[in-house]
Amino acid sequence: GQSILYVLMKRLVLGPIPEGSDVMLHPMAFAGWGGFFLTMLNLLPWGQLDGGHIAYALFGNDQHRFARWFRNGLLLAFAYNVVTMLIPALLHHSRQTWKEAAVSSMFWLIWYGITGVMKRIAGEDHPPFEPEPLGLKRQLVAVACLILFVLLFLPTPMAVYPGR
């Protein structure tokens, strides 16, 4: 998958990539991509993940409503992948097999299930903590983390692209 940050870094280092071409990552660079990926997952604004803690510290109880919207948005990400990957593969308008497209499409549906398990075990709402508001420096760090999440978000994290 390709996040905004990854695409920007690739463009900065290599310039425009010709249509139909892509970059083969060195194992060390792939490890960096993996770090980006795990950071993005940890910054999901849900429950006991770090993103949930950050959003709760920044928005207070309003985060509970936002987290529910976000979790339902995971189903939208799943639907996006079905429309852009699975349906074209089923109609033979893609180089992917329908099995590869199905695997690529399932990621956010699985995370919808994982967040459901987290909700069941730890509860839906973030546990309350000291009602003291964040100082300006901590607010800036929280906003930077939310921006980092947006930059690292992968609409199709586990995309399988055959023939590359």
Image (tube, rainbow, N blue to C red):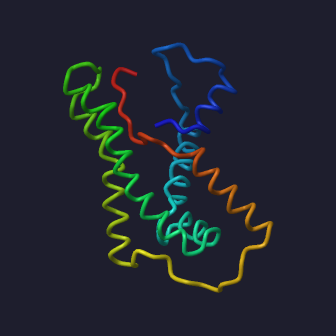
Q: How many marks?
A: 0
Query: In the rendering, at what x and y percent does residue 144 appear?
Result: 70, 55
Q: Is residue 37 left or right of residue 5?
A: left
Residue sitting farthest toward the bottom: 130
Q: Is residue 6 above or below residue 58?
A: above
Q: Name the residue rendered at 56%, 48% in the picture.
A: 36
Counting from the top left corner in percent of width and height, residue 76 is at 36, 46
Give 145 or 61, whichever is nearer the viewer.
61
Left or right: 94 as drawn, with respect to 127: left
Taking the spot 20% from the left edge, 23% from the top edge, the residue there is 91
Judging depth in this view, the residue of 131 and 104 nearest the camera is: 131
- Give the image quarter of residue 131: bottom right
99 and 113: which one is in front? 113
Q: Residue at x 48, y 42 (%)?
A: 154
Asked which quadrant contains residue 85, the reply is: top left
Q: Is residue 56 above or below residue 44?
A: below
Residue 47 position, x and y percent, is 47, 70
The image quarter in which residue 132 lies: bottom right
Residue 80, relative to residue 15: is it above or below? below
Q: Percent x, y for residue 28?
A: 58, 40
Q: Which image quadrant: the C terminus?
A: top left
138 vs 7, left or right, is right
Q: Check the image and report above or below for 61 versus 100.
A: below
